[in-house]
Image (tube, grey):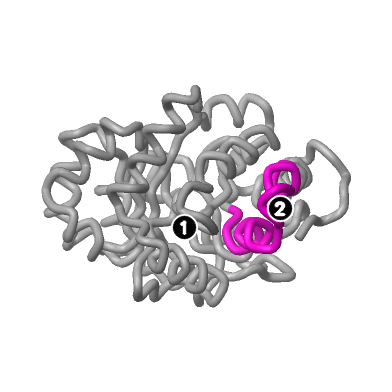
Amino acid sequence: MFVRTRAEGRPALIPFVPAGWPEADATPEIVEAAIAGGADALELGLPFSDPLADGATNQQAYYEALQQGVTPASILENVRELRARGVTIPLIIMGYINPILAYGDAFSRDAVEAGVDGLIVVDMPPNEAREIEEPARAAGLHIIYLVAPTSTEERLRLVAEHAGGFVYCVSLTGITGARQRMSEGLGEFLDRVRAHTELPLAVGFGISEREHVEQVGTVADGAVVGSAFVNVVRDAPREERAALVRAFVERMSGRTGAAVVG
């Protein structure tokens, strides 16, 4: 994916949406609408009751998904359905360690069999990741780690040693949520990360405008659109959701100059 987007002279656009939300069966139609709008990969949030890195938008979505009985197993079933429907782009599960440990040792194997390409575990430091990382590597599942502007050189070195797929660079300190502007020190931060790894770098947290994607594209390989995408999904009537999601992603990807939706 990154080879293709680099050749096209743009960052990969990676929307994030909690899986099994707003309705338990909504994920396939949301993912397909995002792909139609120009998404290059999708992050599917694994609902958890204590999402410490997420802001109010994602916390509410996770709560609603859990209330509807969404589980890791049902999310993997969503991925199987998407692959059966012909979806070929990378699909990444992003979540917290507790639900994965509760699922058991078979999680990585089952995820790969379902069609998952990568796993982001927000609260799993690389020096404590063996229980998840070893079976993931054995199954062929990329483990994607997060780094932040506050990450020490030792933390960056550890992540570089353990990471696969790409490195998720948190653009600012704090929790998820749409912002009006990107961090002024983003380029310097990414230079620090690049000194430790040749993996692609994707930037997330706070990306909510096409301008942000363009800014990220000058210094990174990918842009993750989280809360702004979730807001569109949340506010759209279900019968209009696919069209509104597609329009939003088209705008973020630069395919159209349409006004912000949602």
Residue 168 percent location from the top left of the image = 45, 53
Q: Disc 1 marks which residue? A: 192
- Pair 2/1: label in front: 2
Q: What is the quadrant of the C terminus in the image?
A: bottom right
**Residue in the foreground of this view, choosing between 203 and 79:** 79
| Secondary element at image label 2 | helix
Q: Residues within 10 Å of mark 1 (few under 14, many from 20)?
A: some
How many marks the image carries: the answer is 2
Cβ atoms at labels 2 and 1 below 8 Å apart: no
**Please, what is the three-letter code of the amino acid marked with disc 2?**
Gln
Give the residue displayed 35% in from the left and 40% down from the top.
77
**Residue in the foreground of this view, choosing between 201 and 133:** 133
Give the residue displayed 57% in from the left and 71% down from the top.
57
Give the residue displayed 35% in from the left and 61% down from the top.
69
Q: Disc 2 marks which residue? A: 215
User: What secondary structure prevails in the magenta region?
Assistant: helix
| Secondary element at image label 1 | helix
Q: Vertical placement of 165 versus 259: above or below?
A: above
Q: Would residue 216 be found to the left or right of residue 1 on screen?
A: right
Cα distance, mark 2 to mark 1? 18 Å
Residue 55 percent location from the top left of the image = 52, 75
**Please, what is the three-letter code of the amino acid marked with disc 1?**
Arg
Q: Would residue 100 be found to the left or right of residue 226 on screen?
A: left
Q: Earlier in the sequence, mark 2 or mark 1?
A: 1
Q: Would residue 132 be found to the left or right of residue 207 on screen?
A: left
Q: Residues within 10 Å of mark 2 (few under 14, many from 20)?
A: some
Q: Is residue 144 magenta?
A: no
Kindly indicate the quadrant of the structure image that contains residue 129. bottom left
Q: Which residues are magenta?
A: 225-246
Q: Vertical placement of 42 versus 260: above or below?
A: above
Kindly indicate the quadrant of the structure image that contains residue 139. top left
Q: Is residue 243 magenta?
A: yes
